[in-house]
Image: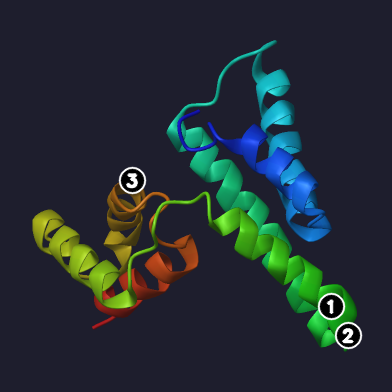
Amino acid sequence: MGILSNLTDEIKNAMRAKDSLRLEALRAIKSGILLSQTAVSGTKELNDDESIRLLQRLVKQRKESAAIYREQDRADLAEPEEAQAKVITEFLPAQLSEKEVEKIISEIITKTKADNLKDMGRVMGMASGQLAGRAEGKLIASLVKQKLDI
């Protein structure tokens, strides 16, 4: 749980600062951790990969909710969701730029000798493993599809 090791301290700091938005996001992370731990076995510690997947899922949920609220012209509900997504993102590893992701995908395509969309699954598997936590799956998929759809 290296990525989330200072979560308790962050929660305490948010309480002291009376930052309710940050506190709510941090508590959502803690809740997700506890649910993940108890779902598998009693008190299994999450490793870094599991923690990253959990955080990515939480960010994705917040962004999707915010998008729905924006479609319904409910900025008052969308803004807290976006702010929580931003707080949760602080715990994720630094995201790669689109150019960096594109370069890595090109290398994978060259290495696997993929040349059409039939090879997309193989390329996606390698790319997802190599870019885990450092790029969104949606971006990876669109770049792979773009590169293979020549």
Q: Is residue 67 left or right of residue 115?
A: right
Is label 2 in contact with label 1 (beta carbons under 8 Å)? yes
Labelled disc at residue 69: 1
Q: In the structure shown, which secondary structural element does the residue marked by tag 2 occupy?
A: loop
Mark 3 and mark 2 lie on one chain; the one further toward the N terminus is: 2
Place of residue 118 in the rendered image (x, y in percent of width and height, measured from the top left): 31, 63
Nearer to the camera, 57 or 20: 20
- The amino acid beneath tag 1 is Tyr
**Residue with the mark numbered 3:** 129
Nearer to the camera, 14 or 62: 14
**Residue with the mark numbered 2:** 72
Vertical order, 103 against 11 (above or below)? below
Which picture quadrant has residue 95? bottom left
Labelled disc at residue 94: none
Distance between the Cα atoms at labels 3 and 2? 36 Å
Distance between the Cα atoms at labels 2 and 1? 5 Å
Crowding near the residue tagged with mark 3, few <14, some 14–19, many ≥20 C-alpha atoms within 10 Å: few
Vertical order, 110 against 13 (above or below)? below
Q: Given the current orientation, which residue lies at the most extreme front position?
A: 16
Q: In the structure shown, which secondary structural element does the residue marked by tag 1 occupy?
A: helix
- The amino acid beneath tag 3 is Gly
